[in-house]
Image: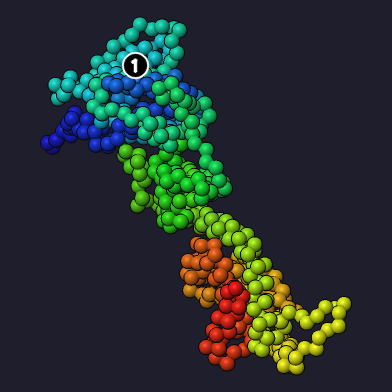
Amino acid sequence: MEKIEVTIDKSHLITIGERLYTENVELLRELVNNSYDADATEVKITIKDDEVIIEDNGTGMDENGLKQYFNIGSPFKKENPKSEKFGRQRIGEFGIGKFSVLSNCDYFEVITKKKDFYARVIFDRKEWEKNKETWELPLMREENNSEMCDGTKVILKGLKKKFDIEMVERRLIETLPLKVENFSVFLNGKRLVAKSLTGRKIPFLEGTDYGIVHGEIVILPAARIEPENAGILIRVKQVAVKRLGFGLEPKFLSRVSGEVNADFLLLTTDRNDFLRDTPQYQKFMEVMDRVIQQIKSEIESQADEKENRRVKRALKEVIKSIEQALLKNKDWAPPGLLPEFGDENKTKVEKPKKIEECEEKHKKKRIKKPHLKQLSPSVLIKKVKIGKMSLALIIDHFGNDGPESFIEGDIIYINRDHPLYIRESVNRERHIMNIARLICQEISLMSNPKNPRHAYERQSKLLKDAFIK
């Protein structure tokens, strides 16, 4: 049987490095991740005009370790998913991260020490491409110094693109596992510290068939919105992969930040995205859908509470104005809503016969108290006393397709989901006037007008007499 040899062109490795890691900051992330996997407690990044040095105090590599390091597609990290010293969940999977350096230079050195072994490996693109048949790299053993600590240093020379230090700092802070104990990263002598956001923090933890999904969502105050922090950062094995909005509308997304960890998610080769057509990702999204619903409810509740405080302050004045307007419209005012005549300590003035008849008729109609509707936790319930009658004003969520307002017995309901209510609530004065309009509308209906036109006329007259001086 004839056989065909399977070969791989050497230039393909360079193509992988150049195309997988299009941003030069990605190569720094990959090299720091290698240090993390090697149980380093400290990584120093030094960026110069034409040179970058990444140095760590990890376990270092012996000769076998170096061979493993340059073994493309090695299963070592999959077979040994946790580091020896700290038991860290290893980040690397494919063994090609070290070739990310080729996106920004054609020459790099790997210098490593592990116990008695101390050596240097050089990758020179020009030398590498000279002989297509030769796959070896030059290994130079160095004189061992017992005072030197174990660890690895990678030196990149002849940079093709310059680094923007501020951008590098910002991206590394976001993507590296800086919150892990016993792990520090320094950039040009400055320690990188993970950001801590101020706001309402909501931690969560939920199990799935594939593993744990856990994290902390932060609802930011409106005054502290930072666009670069909007959305939820997804981490896999402590490393940031992508920030997602999970379909949140802009009004919610601008208030939401935080992180979620899901180590079981499968990643693309460059580790900048997820394999989405997988059961792992689908299960993850099911968990996050539930979390997002909780977050939306929390934000809406905060907005309701803020609005409730604003409405409560204004209602006292609004009700007083409506009461004065009712005095000017005694003939059709609803029974019981006219202010009392006189005082208990004074001689009472006899009420007009027409009003007494209306009150008696109203009492007969009120056979039973109305059934209170299902209310949300952020409902505003305000007792309102006009004349002898006590009303209840309820402002709550009844759906954007529900009525603006409605009445049941002595309860006036106002729908804060109605599009007009939402529109008017943006401006404080219009918001208060809109609430007053709805209260007057329902009071007008309580007086049993002959037709809608009469109800509208009464509502308009009440508003005019209440607010036009």
Residue 135 shows in this picture? no
Q: Amino acid at mark 1?
A: Ile
Q: Nearer the viewer, residue 32 or 165?
A: 165
- Say which quadrant the C terminus sits in: bottom right
Q: Is residue 406 left or right of residue 97?
A: right
Q: Is residue 84 left or right of residue 315?
A: left
Q: What residue appears at the point 36 percent right and 50 percent down from the top-left corner?
A: 276
Q: Residues within 10 Å of mark 1 (few under 14, many from 20)?
A: many
Q: Position of residue 435 (x, y in %)?
A: 57, 71
- Say which quadrant the N terminus sits in: top left
Which residue is farthest left? 2
Residue placed under numbered mark 1 in the picture = 111
**Where is 78 relative to 420, above or below?**
above
Q: Position of residue 313 (x, y in %)?
A: 64, 62
Q: Nearer the viewer, residue 348 or 310?
A: 348
Q: Position of residue 316 (x, y in %)?
A: 67, 67
Q: Position of residue 70 (x, y in %)?
A: 30, 25
Q: What residue appears at the point 55 percent right and 81 percent down from the top-left corner?
A: 460
Residue 325's image quarter?
A: bottom right
Q: What residue appears at the point 78 percent right and 82 percent down from the top-left corner?
A: 341
Residue 337's image quarter?
A: bottom right
**Where is 186 relative to 223, above or below?**
above
Q: What residue appears at the point 53 percent right and 48 percent down from the top-left corner?
A: 221
**Where is 467 relative to 266, above or below?**
below
Residue 48's image quarter?
A: top left
Residue 178 shows in this picture? yes
Which residue is farthest right? 345
Q: Nearer the viewer, residue 331 or 337?
A: 331
Task: Give the secondary structure at mark 1.
Answer: strand
Total numbered labels placed on residues in the image: 1
